Amino acid sequence: MLAWLDGDWPGREPGSRPRDIGGATHHGLERYRRCGDPRAAGAGQGQAGNGSLMRCIPTALAVTDRSRRIRESIEISAITHDDQRATVACAAYNEIAAALLHETPPEQAISAGLVAARELGGPAVADAIEFGCRIQPAMIAATGIIPLDGGASGFVLESLSLAVAAILDPRPLSEVLIDIARIGNDTDTNAAIAGGLLGARDGTSDIPQRWRTLLQFGDEFTEAAAILASSLAWEETCKGAPDTRTGRPLSTQNRTIWYGNVSLLGGCLKAASHCSFG
């Protein structure tokens, strides 16, 4: 994270700032630089932007155990966004994503997110999920009337509501994502967050090829997806077999191997939302 912040990153000049970085992300990473402890970083309470929600989905893809997935979703968010609304939003979002990866219908996947939000004492997050069930991206984009107090300008709970609304929209991925971007204001991050869940719902085959060609590090993402999918497939094949080192079962978790469905979405929509959708 600090390498990215400091410009030590492919395609960047060393010492250059990221093209776009939220206040909470910047403050949280600077605190991490000073203390060296990710559990003592974070921008503090009251900083409830959507930056950690945008980056949290890999935990849903890689962690099969629910308790660990929730715990790590919260911890990874808190490196920059430790406000409870942000940490619980990440945990709930990842429960929705994990359910979608198992081909759970969107309505039931959303219920998994609601359960997590309530278990974690996050009523505001639960309210945001429920509100997302009542709004329609196509209507918002068509009318320009945004039924969100912050105008979809970066508040984590508003981005979560839009993502929930997106996966309840039965249209193809590209049509829904275009409307999320057309809503305006924090277009790229809202689209990336919604895109993660839509990718889990629909798969990479529904991402237009012209969007994929714009994706920086596309080959690297695809390779990483293949490695993770192979690892998880091995885990599934060996489920219940004893580890020769410990004698304990290698895996007791059932998981659908579908990482490739979402491997491109976050970065793709960050790039594509800055470009023409024509």
Image (spheres, helix red, strand yellow):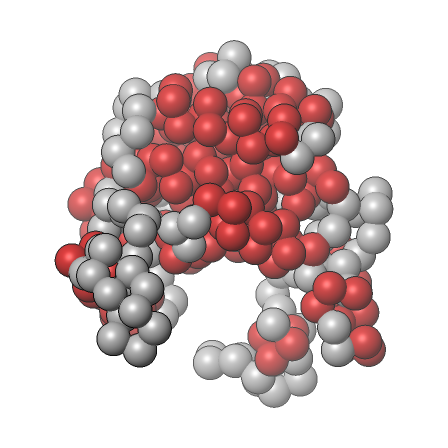
Residue situated in front as seen by the camera: 3 or 180:
3
Looking at the rendered structure, the number of numbered marks drawn on it comes to: 0
Residue 42 x/y as whole percent? 76, 59
Image height of 274 relative to 231, above or below: above
Residue 183 visible in the snapshot: no
| Left or right side of 46 for 264 | left
Residue situated in front as seen by the camera: 202 or 180:
202
User: Which quadrant of the view contains residue 31?
Assistant: bottom right
Which image quarter holds the C terminus? top left
Residue at point 64% right, 39% down? 88
Residue 192 x/y as whole percent? 47, 46
Residue at point 37% right, 35% down? 99
Residue 74 x/y as whole percent? 63, 50
Residue 48 visible in the snapshot: yes
Residue at point 25% right, 75% down? 244
Q: Residue furthest bottom?
A: 14
Residue at point 27% right, 46% down? 254
| Left or right side of 69 for 260 | left
Q: Residue furthest left?
A: 237
Which image quarter holds the N terminus? bottom right
User: Which quadrant of the view contains residue 118?
Assistant: top right
Residue 261 x/y as whole percent? 26, 48
